[in-house]
Amino acid sequence: MPENGKVIENPDGKLDLNNAKFHYPTKPDVQVLNGVNIAIPANKVIAFVGASGCGKSSVMKLLQRFYDPQTGELLYSDINVKDLDN
């Protein structure tokens, strides 16, 4: 977390995952996500569906900040979550 991170005064609730590439730290040779783009509008219900191993759980772990993408960005209300105060 940045020492003097940003605080969102009026968050709109929008989430964007932009060009996210991700691999788990224990398996750096296995690319799990390769350039994923997802836009989640505020106040909407979404579902992730797909075959086993397609990245549904990995995307959720990124959205929950269990991990950060190696490249790309996760934005909340148009601000990179890595820059937020909390």
Image: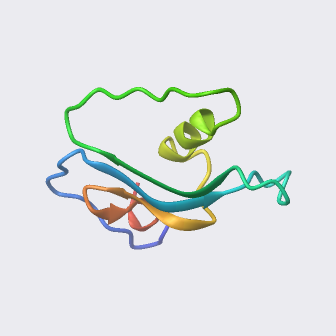
Q: In which image quadrant can residue 41 be found?
A: top left
Residue pictured at 72% horizontal, 55% vertical: 23
Say if 62 sits above or below 56 in the image. Answer: below
* Furthest residue in direction front, as rendered: 51
Q: Split into 4 quadrants, where in the image is the C terminus?
A: bottom left
Say if 71 sits above or below 61 in the image. Answer: below
- Residue 56 is left or right of residue 13, and the answer is right
Q: In which image quadrant can residue 18 be found?
A: bottom left
Q: Position of residue 48 (x, y in %)?
A: 47, 29
Residue pictured at 62% horizontal, 51% vertical: 67
Q: Nearer the viewer, residue 74 or 19?
A: 19
- Residue 28 is left or right of residue 44, and the answer is right
Say if 53 sits above or below 65 in the image. Answer: above
Q: Position of residue 13 (x, y in %)?
A: 23, 44
Q: Position of residue 36 (x, y in %)?
A: 51, 54
* Furthest residue in direction left, as rendered: 10
Residue pictured at 51% horizontal, 26% vertical: 49
Q: How many numbered circles does the render carry?
A: 0
Q: Nearer the viewer, residue 51 or 7?
A: 51
Q: Position of residue 58 (x, y in %)?
A: 62, 41
Residue pictured at 48% horizontal, 70% vertical: 2
Coloring scheme used = rainbow
Q: Nearer the viewer, residue 62 or 51?
A: 51
